[in-house]
Amino acid sequence: MKPVKLPKVVIVGGGTGLSVLLRGLKRHEIDLTAIVTVADDGGSSGRLRDELDIPPPGDIRNVLAALSDVEPLVESLFQHRFSTKNELSGHALGNLMIAALSSITGDFGHAVQEMSRVLNVRGKVLPAANQSVVLHAEMEDGSIVSGESKIPYSGKKIQRVFLTPEKIEPLPETIRAIREADMIILGPGSLYTSILPNLLVPGIGEEVCKAKAKKVYICNLMTQAGETLDFTAADHVKAIYDHMNCSFMDTILVNKEPVPSKIQERYKEEMAKPVVYDVDKLQELGLHTIFDDFITYEDFIIRHDTAKVADILVRLIPKR
């Protein structure tokens, strides 16, 4: 008997939102590939990037942990962050392990593959680029802010984001995964600092635009000060289209569940509020819009309901 070919799903993003969603998706019978941003320049990741000239490992580490199939203690060990008063302070053990493997193998992408085997990862984890990149934002007043960690704190509205250096090579495996995908998922995650940095890597955005796969965008639950202040769901989509110079998404998932006032009060300190779903404008953009209650809470932090979102996404995968 021929082995059953699992549907191929590619998810593009970074940050906490991506890791949360992957924990739900990995429970399903799919061939999963995560393409993860390498634009982070803060904290442990930024220090390792600057000192060792490697892509920042933090987002990659979180995705590996989310997709791992190991004992909880091993995952906790991988995610452990040192709180000493010496040079180890702030470093996550997993970041150090990925950095060490990069040194041993001489290649960051290869190091991620080897780490995937150690952690028995379900699916593939691919960095958006196999080199260190810098994210820049051009603001509405024409000023430039450089560095992913600095952009949200500029106090200005973002006009566009872009990467340096000019010559950035995507991994061949990344391009192949996009071309072979049955479905491509964008988000959830910070629009300008987690999602767009992947699409701006030469080759990746173009391949996503022309891919035959079904393309789904998971809209964020809350706006983000310094990035998407007062953005509606349609504003998120338009920002992606403006950067890609093409309209390519088929479906958008938008939350319709009211956010309790206590939670909204907590987020007021961050100048964040629930994303408004502007149905008419989403329809004008030609998007199939799925509205549902997608919210869960953990210690007063709002998150997507990973199991529910994953179930909906799997049902959306086109039949072969």
Image (cartoon, rainbow, N blue to C red):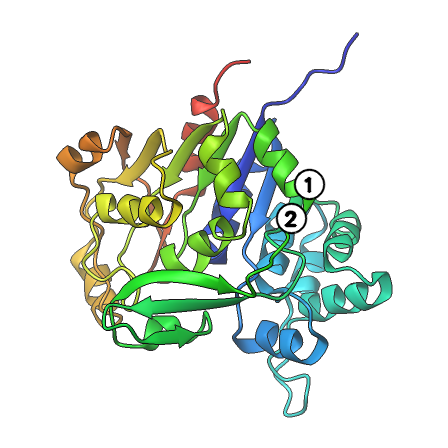
**Residue positioned most to the right:** 104
Q: Which mark is on residue 173?
A: 1
Chain-order first, disc 2 or disc 1: 2
Residues packed near mark 2 inside 10 Å, few (<14), some (14 to 19) or many (20 plus): many
What residue is disc 2 on? 126
Q: Is residue 16 left or right of residue 113?
A: left
Residue 103: x and y in percent read 81, 68
Q: Label 1: state its secondary structure.
A: helix
Residue situated in front as seen by the camera: 296 or 96 = 96
Q: Label 2: state its secondary structure.
A: strand
The image shows residue 43, relative to residue 29, as above or below, that is below
- Residues at discs 2 and 1 in contact (Cβ within 8 Å): yes
Q: Amino acid at mark 2?
A: Leu
Q: Amino acid at mark 1?
A: Glu
Q: CA distance from mark 2 to mark 1?
A: 8 Å
**Residue at the (28%, 39%) spot, across then down:** 254
